[in-house]
């Protein structure tokens, strides 16, 4: 409980052991700025960090969320720093997806 409170989180003991007792408040994390923008693969959104305590430090103030509806049953999302390019490990079995976005989806985002 003391570690939870030190991090700026909420502490709420529950009788259900599958429910976390320590969790972030709703004013923690990021918010969507400017709404969602449709792309051929799915959508994008710019997220801005809310003024709240940092769990790990060195948080990126603005990030880009890129979402892809790759198949009816596969959704991929990627969060990147739009101002700083980072190395991404190439994967021999995962090829870039350029759309079009799948339709008749089996999931909701």
Image: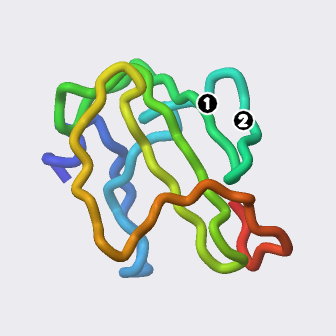
The extreme right residue here reads 104
Label 2 close to label 1 by CB (< 8 Å): yes
Mark 2 neighbour class, 10 Å CA radius: few under 14, some 14 to 19, many 20 or more = some
Whole-Å distance between the Cαs marked 2 and 1? 8 Å
| Residue drawn at 40 percent across, 18 percent down | 51
| Residue drawn at 61 percent across, 30 percent down | 32
Which is in the foreground here, disc 2 or disc 1? 2
The quadrant in which the C terminus is found is: bottom right
Task: Give the numbered dot on residue 36.
Answer: 2
SS for dot 2: strand
Mark 1 neighbour class, 10 Å CA radius: few under 14, some 14 to 19, many 20 or more = some
Q: Nearer the viewer, residue 83 or 5?
A: 83
Q: How many marks?
A: 2
Residue 74 lies, in percent from the top left, at 60, 74
Task: Give the numbered dot on residue 64.
Answer: none
SS for dot 1: strand
Residue 99 lies, in percent from the top left, at 68, 58
Vertical side of 21 occupied by 18: above or below:
below
104 relative to 36 in the view: left or right: right
Vertical side of 62 occupied by 19: above or below:
below
Residue 44 lies, in percent from the top left, at 63, 39
| Residue drawn at 72 percent across, 29 percent down | 35
26 relative to 3 in the view: left or right: right
Residue 48 lies, in percent from the top left, at 49, 23
Q: Name the residue tied to disc 1.
A: 32
| Residue drawn at 56 percent across, 28 percent down | 46
Vertical side of 16 occupied by 13: above or below:
above
């Amino acid at each position: 409980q003391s570690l939870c409170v030190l991090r700026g989180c909420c502490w709420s003991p529950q009788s259900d052991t599958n429910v976390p007792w320590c969790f972030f408040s709703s004013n923690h994390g990021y918010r969507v700025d400017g709404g969602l923008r449709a792309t051929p693969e799915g959508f994008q959104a710019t997220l801005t960090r809310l003024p709240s305590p940092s769990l790990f430090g060195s948080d990126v103030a603005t990030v880009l969320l890129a979402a892809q509806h790759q198949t009816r049953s596969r959704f991929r999302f990627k969060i990147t720093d739009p101002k700083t390019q980072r190395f991404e490990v190439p994967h021999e079995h995962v090829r870039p997806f350029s759309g079009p976005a799948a339709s008749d989806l089996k999931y909701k985002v």
